[in-house]
């Protein structure tokens, strides 16, 4: 069964808080329900404890799909990352989520309006193996501890942006790491979402359109 949820970025932007900053969370949830969505991802206006978040979502008939988590595995080790993710992963687990959406942002520029995308970081060829090793270990630990599948969100302005970088990331990571295929970002990054879907279909657990 395919479940369709919405991202609150359509109402309030997480990178540029002034965009939609005046729109109440209740408006977002009400309009998403009216549009036929039954789930929502986290956004900056959502409470971050299950006891506060659950009644709000329940009132509008929504389940929590998941929520973005920014990893920094290029600059810190797996143990440090696992300590950093505790609060976020605990919330997702308590809310009955199945996946944890993650993206590497330790050197990303996607929220810096003063920089062009051409200034984004590009990972050295020699660094990919260690990056993949850390991500795989992180995903394995998250699965074991919280029962959550890590799905990687390739994103503009980050080290995994282009089609070839998505392919490389999937190549250097193990089965514990799945892919969130964002068709918009893939196209914007010059890639072919259909080819990516075919090539990585066994490890795609989440799709953004």
Image (cartoon, rainbow, N blue to C red):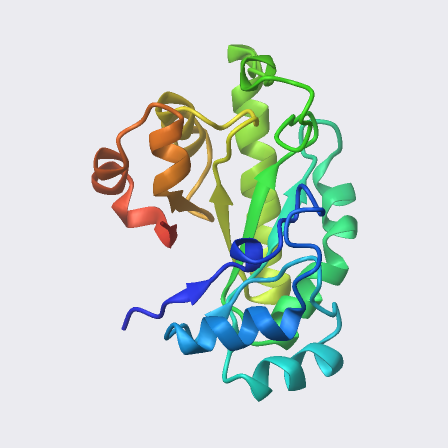
Quadrant including the N terminus: bottom left
Q: Indicate left or right for 209 with 56 as reference.
A: left
Q: Residue at x 65, y 26 (%)?
A: 109
The image shows residue 34 at horizontal and vertical percentages of 42, 77
Which of the two residues, 185 or 152, is positioned nearer the viewer here? 185
Q: Looking at the image, is 163 positioned above or below residue 138?
A: above
The image quarter containing residue 179 is: top left
Relative depth, front residue between 101 and 7: 7
Query: How many numbered marks have been drawn onto this rendered protein structure?
Result: 0
Q: Is residue 132 left or right of residue 15?
A: left
Q: Is residue 128 above or below residue 111?
A: above
Q: Position of residue 41 (x, y in %)?
A: 55, 62
Pinpoint residue 66: horizontal percent, then vertical percent: 55, 62
Between 167 and 163, the one nearer to me in the picture: 163
- Residue 5, compared with residue 124, is above or below; it is below
Q: Residue furthest front?
A: 22
Relative placement, left or right, of 208 versus 149 is left
């Amino acid at each position: 069964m395919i479940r369709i949820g919405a991202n609150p970025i359509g109402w309030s932007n997480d990178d540029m808080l002034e965009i939609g900053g005046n729109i109440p969370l209740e408006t977002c949830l009400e309009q998403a329900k009216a549009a036929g969505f039954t789930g929502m991802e986290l956004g900056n206006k959502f409470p971050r404890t299950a006891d506060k978040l659950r009644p709000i979502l329940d009132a509008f008939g929504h389940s929590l799909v998941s929520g973005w988590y920014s990893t920094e595995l290029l600059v810190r080790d797996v143990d440090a990352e696992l300590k950093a993710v505790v609060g976020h992963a605990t919330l997702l687990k308590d809310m009955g989520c199945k996946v944890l959406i993650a993206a590497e942002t330790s050197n990303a520029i996607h929220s810096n309006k003063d920089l062009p995308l051409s200034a984004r970081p590009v990972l050295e060829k020699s660094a990919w193996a260690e990056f993949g090793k850390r991500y795989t270990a992180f995903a394995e630990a998250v699965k074991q501890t919280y029962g959550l599948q890590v799905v990687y969100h390739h994103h503009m302005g980050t080290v995994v942006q282009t089609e070839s970088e998505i392919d490389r990331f999937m190549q250097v990571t193990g089965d514990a790491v799945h892919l969130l295929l964002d068709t918009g970002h893939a196209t914007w990054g010059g890639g072919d979402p259909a080819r990516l879907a075919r090539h990585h279909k066994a490890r795609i657990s989440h799709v953004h359109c």
